[in-house]
Image (cartoon, rainbow, N blue to C red):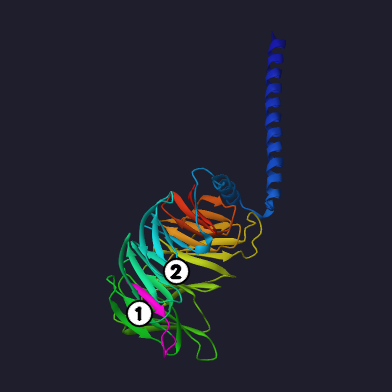
Amino acid sequence: MARSKVNSSSDKKNKLLSIALCIILFLAVLGVAFFVYLKSQNINIHDVSLKELVQHVFSENKSGTSTEKVVEIPFDAGEHPVFTILNGDIVKCNKDSIRGLDKSGQEKWVVPIFANKPIVKEAGAYLVVADMGGRDIAVLKGKEKRWNKKVENNIINVDVNKNGYVSVVQEEKGSKGAVTVYDPAGNEVFIRGKAENYILSALVSSDRQVLINCIDASGITINTNFEFTDIFGKPFANIQKENMIYPSIWYMGEGFFAVNDTSISYFDKDRNEKWKKEHKEIYTSTTVLDKYAVIAVKDQEKKGLFKSKTKVIVYTADGEEKASQWVDEPVKNMYAYDDLIAVNTGREAVFMSSKGSMKGKYTSKSDITDVRLLNKSEALIVTRSSILVVPVS
């Protein structure tokens, strides 16, 4: 009996040892396979944290190219149409019309316009289309045309806010440019010319203040002047930034932020520069939820897990980095809907939340010229000869 008990105990130990050896062998094989994967991804295991590793693996699993439920709508590339989204409709604008399409490409409505080189901007329910270098402009609210007119001078830039106020930057004889502001009914509120400064853009805030972005090239250096007027064109403040040009300005919260090719600055409601962030190169910018700034920046030679070249950063109005995500190529443009951000790298559309989580991506067979969001689950991909409605995740 004693010998039987000893043998039984020995057998149990051998079985446990065999199981342990199998587990160790399995983990070793798994480790080798994972090491090979890391090498294939050019990942240096010594330079990566566990958190980065987990984020990378899960983002790879979630971000596969989806080919299901993709609707492709071809168009004549010779027309050079411009696309955007308005109230869930796909808007196609070419030189003679603005057309609303459903997600299958069927026409829902049409508004005539002449725009040889259309500029298209939307805010809320409003859409403005202008002929860049021409004189025609049309404003829609939903699918209805609110007003249209031919202005006196060639149009340089245009913008519309969510309340329907339109700002038009145009050439003007005897000056270096002028800003005209129209109310939602199309009535001219004011026109303000600039004799010394070139005007890049103008925005009307939700509380009806006007921000005019000007370049002063009269001296040795080229400076930016941010001029503030009331809704009737009366100036009340000015900010000068020496040796700086800001191609992009955005209202955000109670202030605004300005972006050039290497820095982003936020100015508070009292027009004080609250913070400034420097980067090696900034590709593009946008806002999300009207309270966060989003920029795509060139990678600062980061080593380790990410072999990516571009970092998409979400900043708060306090200058804190709320979230970030890495993408594989330089970013062409971005678009935001609610808390979702669409990032176009030219061959891929990457979708991320304002919290930095990867939602999905779509890889195109041809160059992507633009990306828009129809809603939180569907995106519009614009290529050189077709548009595609694709799932976000």
Q: Can you give x and y, in whole percent of width and height, for residue 46 in the image?
A: 69, 53
Q: Nearer the viewer, residue 146 or 325?
A: 146
Residue 171 included in the magenta stretch of the image? yes
Residue 118 numbered mark, or none: 2
Q: Which mark is residue 180?
A: 1
Q: Does residue 307 lie above or below 22 as drawn?
A: below
Q: Position of residue 366 (x, y in %)?
A: 59, 55
For residue 252, say whether it is visible: no
Task: Tell me the residue at 29%/79% (across/down).
Answer: 189
Task: Give the quarter of the image for residue 151.
Answer: bottom left
Q: Residue at x 38, y 80 (%)?
A: 179
Outermost residue to the top:
1
Labelled disc at residue 235: none
Q: Is residue 72 left or right of residue 290?
A: right
- Could you tell me the amino acid type at mark 1? Thr
Instruction: Describe the element under mark 1 as helix, strand or loop.
Output: strand
Q: Choose top left, top right, bottom left or bottom right for residue 271.
A: bottom left
The residue located at (68%, 36%) in the rendering is: 27
**Is the residue marked by circle 1 packed among few (<14), some (14-19), or many (20+) residues within 10 Å?**
some
Q: Which residue is painted at 59% across and 63% down in the image?
A: 330
Graded by Cα atoms within 10 Å as few (under 14), some (14 to 19) or many (20 or more), the crowding at tag 2 reads many
- Left/right placement of residue 110 relative to residue 312 reads left
